[in-house]
Image (cartoon, rainbow, N blue to C red):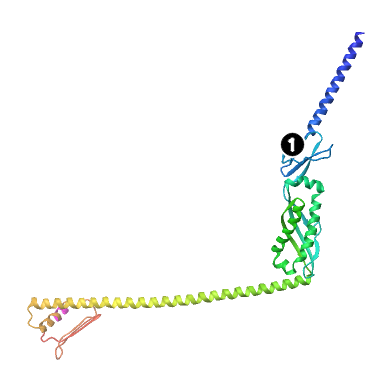
Amino acid sequence: MEDYNFMGSDSKSKTICAIISLVSLVTTILIGISFGSVEPTEYGILYNTITKKIDEKNILTGGLQYLGVPNKIITFPRVNKQIEFSDQKAADAPALSTRTKEGLELKLHFSFQYLLQKDQLVNLYRLVGTDYNQLYTRIASDVILANAGNYHATEYWQKRSEVGNQLEKALNVKLQEAFANCTGLMLLKIDLPDSYEDAIVDTQLVNQQRLTQEKVKSINLILAGIEVDNSVANQNISIINAEAQYNATIYSNNINAKMIKNTVTKQAEAYTQAKKDLQFDNSKNLLDFVYYLNIMNLDKKKENNKLIIGVDNPRVTLQEVGKGYNFAPSALV
């Protein structure tokens, strides 16, 4: 009887342990699924999997979030997304074919960026769920096809940026109706008929050549002007130099004249003083004095010095390199 009770209590303990373990496991699982996370580049809204309703009041941002057991997070991009229309393999849709205002065939390759409106995420989910990328692709196709034909072919070449800006504005109006904003549009490639493109290229080449010739002409005019300025400057320099040389010559001659005048004046004063001191009776005696003084000062070492005496009508000639004297004194001593 005692062995039977012992086995019964052991079975109860195992059952209780199993129940506790099961409850713990279920609790852990429930706690685990009650939390979720949203990436920093995403928004999130709560969706109740039981009632099939969404939380219209709370928009979740990046981080760990408490959801509750029946809820899950539906995420939306928080950053700019791009849709491309082109012939590239990675493009979202093919390039759009239409016609210009004058009826020429036109094929547009372009891309645009959009940003979802945070406060309209609930309405966007009700509209298309999470298939918003397909919605915006269809809207972009309709808008571009409706507006691309409003421009002439030349405008796509000459006013490409303006055309792109106008298409972006038109697309933004329609995207805002679908709870997004167009943040940019770029015309990647514009295909027109080859014959028309060739004509445009030829026209552009002619215009470029004309502009080049105008630039060359302008440069030549500038160079000619510089040459004239240089000639005028050189002429002015020559005139200034001539005037400076003339003034320098005048100044130098004046100085030399003053020096000669001063020398002659001093010599005259010295001879007058000598005549007075030596008590000469007349100027003839003074001249004889000067004559004999020059003979005394004659440099005997110079080969070309000559003293000639004893000719008819006695006359003495003094010669010195760089000098010459001729004098006939009244008497020789």
Residue shown at 80%/65% (left/top)?
A: 98
Which of the 4 quarters of the picture holds residue 325?
bottom left
Against 9, is 48 above or below? below
Left or right? Give the position of 81 relative to 278: right
Q: In terms of secondary structure, what is the magenta stretch mainly?
A: helix
Compared to residue 271, the image places residue 167 above or below, namely above
Residue 275 visible here: yes
Q: Which residue is labeled 1 in the image?
A: 65
Give the amino acid at mark 1: Gln
Rendered location of residue 130, percent (x, y):
81, 47
The residue positioned 83% from the left and 25% from the top of the image is 23
Q: Relative to the observer, which residue lies in front, 116 or 316?
A: 116
Residue 163 point in image, percent of width and height? 72, 63
Query: Which quarter of the rendering shows the C terminus?
Result: bottom left
Task: List x then y, in percent, for residue 311.
Answer: 15, 89
Q: Residue furthest top?
A: 1
| Secondary element type, mark 1 | strand
Which image quadrant for residue 330?
bottom left
Residue 139 located within the stretch drawn in magenta = no
Residue range highlighted in magenta:
291-295
Residue 175 is drawn in which quadrant? bottom right
Q: Residue at x 71, y 61 (%)?
A: 166
Q: Residue 125: where, in percent of width, then height?
A: 80, 46
- Left or right? Give the position of 303 relative to 59: left
Q: Residues within 10 Å of mark 1 (few under 14, many from 20)?
A: some
In the picture as drawn, the residue positioned furthest to the bottom comes out as 312
Give the total of numbered labels.
Answer: 1
Residue 297 visible in the picture: no
Q: Say which of 171 and 29 sits in front.
A: 171
Q: Is-magenta flag for residue 294? A: yes
